[in-house]
Image (cartoon, rainbow, N blue to C red):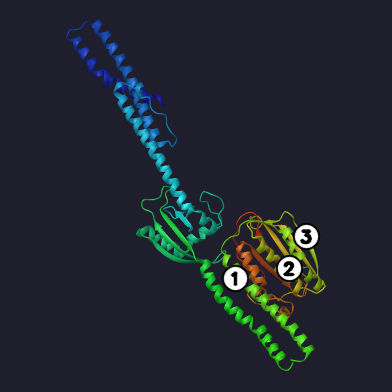
Amino acid sequence: MAGHPRALRVLRTAVLIGAAPALTLLALMLAGELAPRAGAWALLACTIAAGGTAWLWVGDVARLSDALRLATEVEAPIDPLAADSLLPGLADIGAGVNRLARSLAARRAELGLLRRADEAIVERLPDPLLVLAPDGTPLRANAAARSLFGGRGEGGGLGGGEVAALLRHPLLAEAVDRALTGGRSEVVDLVMPVPVPRDLAARAIPMDPPLADGGRLVIVLNDRTRERAVERMRHDFVANASHELRTPLASLIGFIETLRGPAEGDAEARRRFLGIMAEQAARMQRLIDDLLGLSRIELTEHQPPTGEAALADLVRAEVAALEPLLAARQVRVETALDEAARATPADSDQLAQVVRNLLANAIRHGREGGRVRLSLAVAPRAGRPGVMLGVEDDGPGIPKADLPRLTERFYRVDKGRARQTGGTGLGLAIVKHIVNRHRGVLSIDSKLGEGTQAQVWLPGDGAATATLILPQSGAKIPPR
C-alpha cells in the first residue's frame, strides 16, 4: 500500500512536467505543422522523459524528507545525505539539509552535555532536593534526598513511601500549589513524625521554563533535626541529670559529713560508708554514661545506618561479655541462633547495645537461678525481608498497665529493685531509639508469674518503615 501514494505523486509530477510539451505537440499536429506519425513518436518520448524525471524527482524529495525527519527525530547520529547524487535542482537543497543535520547534531550534543551537567549539579548538592512534574509527582531526587529518605541506588530513584508522605503533608501541598499558581518561591516548616521525627524547612521553587526532564517544580529541603535535637539534648540532660543525680549526691554528701563528724574515728563505719559511697558514685557514672549515650543516639536517629551486622556472632559476643552478671545471678542462657540472620542496613555497635540492654534486663529482672532464652531467625514482615531477635526470661513478669511505659526514660516498674540491681531506667529507651533508627519494630509481651519476652524485628535487605507499637495495649509510642 505504501507504493500507491508514491505512484500517485509520480503521476501528478509527470503530468506537471510533461503537460506543456505534450500540449504544444498536439497543437502543432492539429495545425498540420507536424506529421501525425512524427508527432506521436514525439509525444511518446515526451511522456517517457516526464515520467522518468518525475520518478527521480519524487525519489530525491523523499530522500530529503527522510533526512530531515531523521535529523530532527532520531537521537542517534545520521549518515550525511549524498548531495551529488541528487538532481541538479535538489543538490543545493541536499547540501543545506546536511548542514542542518550537522547543526542539529551539534546542538543535540550540547544539550546532552548541559543536561548531564544539570543532573551532576543537582546530584552533588549538599541539601536534599526533589524535582516534581507539573502534576506534582516526583521525577528524581539527588543523593542527599535519597540518603534522607532511605532510597537505594543511582539515577534519582527513591525507596519506600517516605517521599509520598512528605508530598502529602498539608503544609507542603499548599506551598506547592501556591508556587505553581503564583510563580514564586514558597517556604514552609514541616515536622515529619514517622518513621522517626524530622524537622524540615522546605522551599518550593517553580521552574520557568521547565527543566530538561520536564521538571516544573524543585523542592529544596533543609534538615534541621540535628540542630533541634542538640537543643533538646541540652535541656533534657540538665533536667534529667538534676533529677536523677539528686539522690546519690545527697547520699554522698551525707556520708562525707558523717565521716568528717561522728564517724571520724570509727574504722568499721568508715569502711561501710566508703563502700556505699563507691556504689553511689558508680550509679552516678552509669547514669551519666547512659544519658550521654542516649543523647548521641537521638542525634543520629533520623539518619538511616549503613553497613550490615552478622547478628549471631554479635549475640554470642554479648553473652560472653555478661558472664559475670550471669554467674552472680546464677542464670543460664539458652540460644537458638540462625547463622544466616544478617541485619542490613545496620550499625553493628548500636545493635550490640540493643542485645546487651535486653539481655541485661532479662538477667537482672528475671528469676535468680532461672534461665534466659535468646533466639535469632530470618523473619520476613509484611513482605519485607528481615530478622527477628527474641529475648525471653522466666521472671515474675510485668503488669499489663506498665507495658506501654517501659520505653520511657527512667520509668521503673519496681523502683527499689531496679536500683538494687544497678539499672538506670534508660536501657529500654536506648533500645527504642536504636530500633527506630534502623526502621525496625520493638514489641514487649509479659504475663505475671511466667516471664517477659522482648522481640526486635530489623530489616534484613532493604529499608523498611515502621512505628513502634506495644501490641498488648495497642498504644503507639512516638519517638522522642
Mark 3 element type: strand
* Foreground: disc 3 or disc 2: 2
Q: Which residue is mark 3?
A: 336
Instruction: Give the distance between the C-alpha atoms of the residues marked 3 and 2, in whole angstroms.
Output: 14 Å
Considering depth in this image, is 94 or 265 the residue closer to the camera?
A: 265
User: In the image, which disc is placed on residue 295?
Assistant: 1
Quarter location, residue 392 = bottom right
Residue furthest out toward the bottom: 262
Residue 404, horizontal then vertical, whole percent: 65, 73
Q: Amino acid at mark 3?
A: Ala
Q: Position of residue 444 (x, y in %)?
A: 69, 69
Disc 2, SS: helix
Q: Is residue 20 visible?
A: yes
Looking at the picture, which amino acid does disc 2 mark?
Answer: Leu
Q: Which residue is mark 2?
A: 359
Q: Is residue 400 above or below residue 168?
A: below
Q: Earlier in the sequence, mark 1 or mark 2?
A: 1
Q: Between disc 3 and disc 2, whose residue precedes? A: 3
> Taking the image as drawn, is residue 473 in sight?
no
Query: Percent x, y for residue 341?
Result: 71, 56
Q: Sequence-wise, which precedes: disc 1 or disc 3?
A: 1
Left of 26 or right of it: where is 323? right
- Residue 2 occupies quadrant: top left
Give the amino acid at mark 1: Ser
